[in-house]
Image (cartoon, helix red, strand yellow):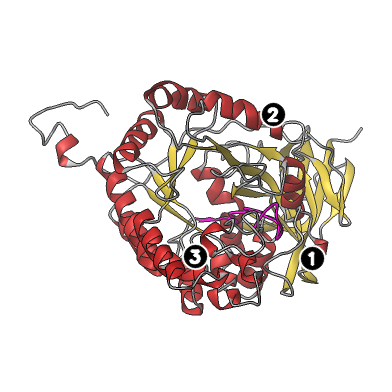
Amino acid sequence: MSNFDLVIRGGTVANSAETFTGYVAIRDGRIVAIGNDLGDAKQVIDATGKYVLPGGIEAHCHIEQESSSGLMTSDDYYSGSVSAAFGGNTCIVPFAAQHRGQRLSDVLELYHGRAAPKSVIDYSFHLIVSDPTDEVLHEELPKAISEGITSFKIYMTYDRLIVDDSQMLDIFAVAKKHGALTMIHAENNAMIKWMSGRLVDQGHGAPKYHALSHPRTAESEAINRAVALASFVDAPILIVHVSTEAGARIIAKARYDGRKVFGETCPQYMFLNAEQMDLPGMHGAKLCCSPPLRDRASQEEIWRCLQNGTFQVYSSDHAPYRFDETGKLNAGPEPEFPKIANGLPGIEMRLPLLFSEGFIKGRITLNHFVALAAGNVSKIYGLDHVKGSITEGKDADIAIWDPDVTREVRAEDLHDNMAYTPYEGMTVTGWPTTVIQRGDVIIENKELQAKRGAGEFVPRRTIDCTGMPGRLAPELDPAKNFGVELEL
């Protein structure tokens, strides 16, 4: 009788802080032993010459989600999760978006109904909070956190999503009290509207001018304000999709000061630039995202900040809108840039790009790659008890990478519901050739072996800010404010 359901042998196994050659044994969907010559198994995978890594966790993606204007992303939970899996991911954390007037319980019921019958890999949700009423703050958010949805996102821009400074403080106070993490889209709304209005009024409405309409200062000002507000009440935050060195420096300084601040960037700010938006006709619309693509110098700055640890999270911000009337051109065949749907596809290419251009080319170590692919995300977002490393007792979520595979990126080979990829024509070295979800092989020989609905909802733990001491503002600290205990 076999001791294990599956054994992976002969590969180089790596986590965020260790690398070794050995066997990984799996039983009942969990990793049960790591070592040498572990005995019989019902199935054996020979990973000689390959890397055996934790399955990726994609924690910033927009799947089957309506925008604030009602536009639905092109990927549902089936195509989105399949594309993620082919890119070496075994877990996704998309957004469940509250729009003005909606109850969070209704939002979550809607998104559970979308994900459960379709997702082929495990999933959780971040809540987008755009209407922080008293009921939302004091009843619905605490309930959602207790159910394992321990992060939510707020916007400092977009008229239909924006929350003001006072509302941000209210949300931060709830997050601090209940152990949740607030993700922040940090851009100055007034500055963007001011710049966009002048560009369009003076005849500069083509897609490429979107890159000018979101000034670098709009990002750095908003990040600085978000850090100041969150630090005032000593609440943990994560600044998403940082695109500028100035913004990154604010995050680095805050972390140096002991503030509970995390930073994230995305492949588009490392592999694409604004020059590529200068295309004939409306084709530049394919590259409209927010924050926008920056210049080549900014690309190198973002790489440096990824290498030095300023960014702990690397996500795709997969926001797929097709290049037609259902997506990018929903406002007409030749809309001015403020009316172009914002977002890029990238969920499948996130990890292959970083493996190729980061690890293979020597810009980051294999362990750093694993940390960015899964390890850091699992700790920051409360998944570390079940995912994020190849460790006995955790879910057997594993991606086996072949470093000798070379592929030219082509949209027709990807698995999202898109007709283009912004990375078309790039050559990448290394690819996840076998993907295992809770002990079951779901990708092998370029074929999907998982069924719709095979993924499960994963409740997440509260945020762990160990090692990030933080401190209350003096006005809120009873030791410094005449003993006043203000309830946040």
Q: At numbered mark 2, what does the secondary structure look like: helix, strand or loop?
A: helix
- State the separation of the CA atoms marked 2 and 1: 41 Å
Q: Which of the two labelled residues, at mark 3 and mark 2, occupies the earlier sequence position?
A: 2
For the point 70% across and 55% down, the residue is 325
Numbered circle sitting on residue 306: 3
Residue 484 in the image, given as x and y percentages of width and height: 13, 27
In reply to whether residue 318 is colored magenta, the answer given is yes
Name the mark nearer the viewer: 1 or 3.
3
Q: Residue at x 33, y 37 (%)?
A: 167
- Disc 2 residue crowd, few under 14, some 14–19, many 20+, Cα 10 Å: few
Give above or below for 249 relative to 371. below
Q: Quadrant of the N terminus?
A: top right
Image point 55% across, 72% down: which residue?
A: 208
Q: Which residue is mark 1?
A: 49
Percent of width and height locating residue 150: 49, 34
Question: Which SS class for mark 3?
Answer: helix
Q: Nearer the viewer, residue 83 or 256?
A: 83
325 or 227: nearer the viewer? 325
Principal SS element in the magenta part? loop
Q: Position of residue 258 (x, y in %)?
A: 30, 51
Which residue is under mark 2?
A: 113
Picture quadrant of residue 105: top right
What segment carries the magenta color?
313-328
- Look at label 2 and name its amino acid: Gly
In this rendering, would 371 be left or right of 326? left
